[in-house]
């Protein structure tokens, strides 16, 4: 079986804090800009290429290389991504 390594690709991401304004910068230019937050809830529903996905507080919301949005759990994000700019903190 062959092994593969992820190519180094820069993405944009924000950590979901339960406030819809947090993800607004990612919506600009997103190819799947549909996100929903029910009144009084802290979860965010994101229309992804794979269907609707849920983000909980503490998850990362990522805009991928084709403008797609998707959530990522904090532990997976920390193992997969590192800051690309000075001052960025995961």
Image (cartoon, rainbow, N blue to C red):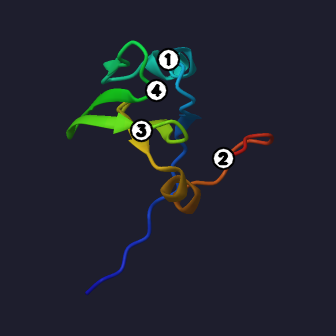
Q: At 38% across and 18% down in the image, what residue appears?
A: 37
Q: Position of residue 44 (x, y in %)?
A: 39, 27
Residue 79 sits in quarter: bottom right
Q: What's the distance in space between the residues labelled 3 and 4, CA to CA? A: 23 Å
Q: Position of residue 90 (x, y in %)?
A: 66, 47
Question: Can you identify the residue that label 2 sits on?
Answer: 90
Q: Position of residue 82 (x, y in %)?
A: 64, 54
Question: Can you identify the residue that label 1 sits on?
Answer: 20
Question: Can you identify the residue that label 4 sits on?
Answer: 42
Q: CB under 8 Å between callouts 2 and 4?
A: no
Q: For mark 4, give the secondary structure.
A: loop
- Answer with mark 2 or mark 3, whichever residue precedes in sequence: 3
The label number, if any, that marks residue 48 in the structure image: none
Q: For mark 1, give the secondary structure.
A: helix
Is disc 4 surrounded by few (<14), some (14 to 19) or many (20+) residues within 10 Å? some
Q: At 46% across and 26% down in the image, what residue appears?
A: 42
- Answer with mark 1 or mark 4, whichever residue precedes in sequence: 1
Q: What's the distance in space between the residues labelled 2 and 1, CA to CA? A: 19 Å
Residue 32 sits in quarter: top left
- Answer with mark 1 or mark 3, whichever residue precedes in sequence: 1
Question: Can you identify the residue that label 3 sits on?
Answer: 64
């Amino acid at each position: 079986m062959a092994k593969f390594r992820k190519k180094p690709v820069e993405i944009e991401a924000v950590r979901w804090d339960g406030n819809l304004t947090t993800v607004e910068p990612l919506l600009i230019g997103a190819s799947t800009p549909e996100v929903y937050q029910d009144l009084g809830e802290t979860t965010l529903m994101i229309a992804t290429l794979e269907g609707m996905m849920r983000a909980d507080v503490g998850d990362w919301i990522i805009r991928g290389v084709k403008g797609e949005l998707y959530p990522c759990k904090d532990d997976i994000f920390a193992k997969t991504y590192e800051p690309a700019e000075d001052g960025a903190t995961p």
